[in-house]
Amino acid sequence: MKVKPTERDEVMTDGGNAMFEDAEATDVGPAQQFKEVLYEGVVAPAKIAWSDWRTKTGIVILGSFVVIALLVMSHRNGIDILNTLIGPVSPWELAEPTSSYGCSGGKGGECAVGYPNSRQPFTYWDTPLGTDGSGRDLLSAVIWSTPRMLKMIVAGGVFSIAMATIVGTVAGYKGGTTNTVLMTLTDIGMSIPGLPLVIVLIAVIDPQSPYVIGTLIVINVWAGLARTIQSQVLSVREQSYVEASRTMGVSTPRIIQKDILPNLMPYIMVNFVYAARRVIYDSVALFFLGFLTFETIANWGLMMQWARANGNALTVPEARYQILVPMVPIVVLSFGLILLSQGTDRLFNPRVRTRHEGETVEEEGEDEEIQPAMM
């Protein structure tokens, strides 16, 4: 059956230029470009992240620790914001934890036998979490240690991820001699036992800065992640769009930035979180075992070490709260990091992100959860 062409078909088949003639030319100015970049880079990722309860909870937890750290730092600089806010309603106030409390004044019954300065939790509201064997306020000690903990976490996480990303990406993309040399260094780093190396370096250097301590703890952790990233880059660099960029003469740094790294972001973010958790656990363990020593409270692990050494918290039941109180922020902070890492998979995984935005429909269960690299 012969079909009579319509008027529109006649127009469209007339050399094909009418379609472009009908299109309206749109000039995109700097303001519109800025709005598009802002939406794609900030607004859309923020909406996706905030729509996941895990990301939301992780951000709230980590944000709370950051706020506490800022309040402590402002207090040390003479700007007493926290005590000004809670002063009218709370007998407790933030102060540098020193030996200033006891169980005198007719209320000595709340102290453990043989520990006249160790107030039990929830007995005196000016020290709501109690005091240690020397009379130091445990709540103030936990809060006072927060800034140094966060500095160690940031330093260790950034150093580990930066080293792994640079070494793994360059080795995988360049190949040849560069890949051989960098992967040999990576294998050497992986073959050295991590904990003995860290203990020796700490004994030699005796670091006091939280940034140095955080970096030393992950001194060879980056090697395992670098191996994983290198294997990922070997696969990505053979993709058609990377070949197209090379054919067009795009520079290597530009290809790595635009075509390689976006595919690695889920691995990088997840392993950043695991590196941060390792800094928390290892620093607490090193302080608890006595390899890192300070005269003032500088870490939750140091509080646990003092509770064990000076308060016999492991053997005296009435003193166990001294070792349990600093464990609470360790667990809460680690839980927040885990939730944030799981939520960021939705943010950086292109398939999950596309499904969330409703652009495509994929079968459930197709996406695999990203696992951290072997460290």
Image (tube, helix red, strand yellow):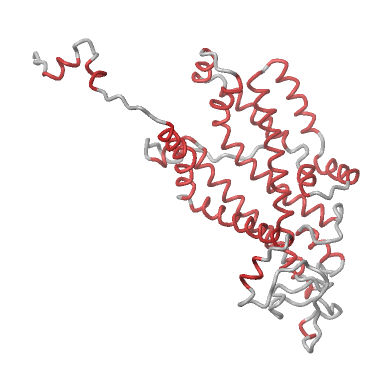
State whether residue 113 is above or below residue 94: below
Q: Position of residue 91 (x, y in %)?
A: 67, 78
Pick the quarter of the image with the C terminus. top right
Q: Residue at x 72, y 43 (%)?
A: 156
Q: Residue 268: x and y, percent?
A: 61, 37
Q: Is residue 309 above or below residue 275?
A: below
The answer to which image quadrant residue 57 occupies is: bottom right
Say which of 105 and 73 sits in front.
73
Is 182 placed left or right of 367 in the picture?
right
- For residue 272, side relative to residue 183 (left or right): left
Furthest-bottom residue in view?
Answer: 106
Instruction: Name, please, the residue furthest toward the right.
Output: 204
| Image position, residue 142 (x, y; %) | 72, 63
The residue lying at 65 percent from left, 37 percent from top is 373
List x then y, in percent, for residue 187.
Answer: 76, 28
Q: Is residue 180 above or below residue 147?
A: above
Q: Residue at x 84, y 55 (%)?
A: 289
Kindly indicate the quadrant of the structure image that contains residue 16.
Answer: top left
Q: Nearer the viewer, residue 309 or 245?
A: 245
Q: Nearer the viewer, residue 22 or 110?
A: 22
All told, the count of numbered labels is 0
Quadrant in the picture for the N terminus = top left
Residue 153, relative to residue 67: is it above or below? above
The residue at the point 71 percent across, 69 percent down is 94
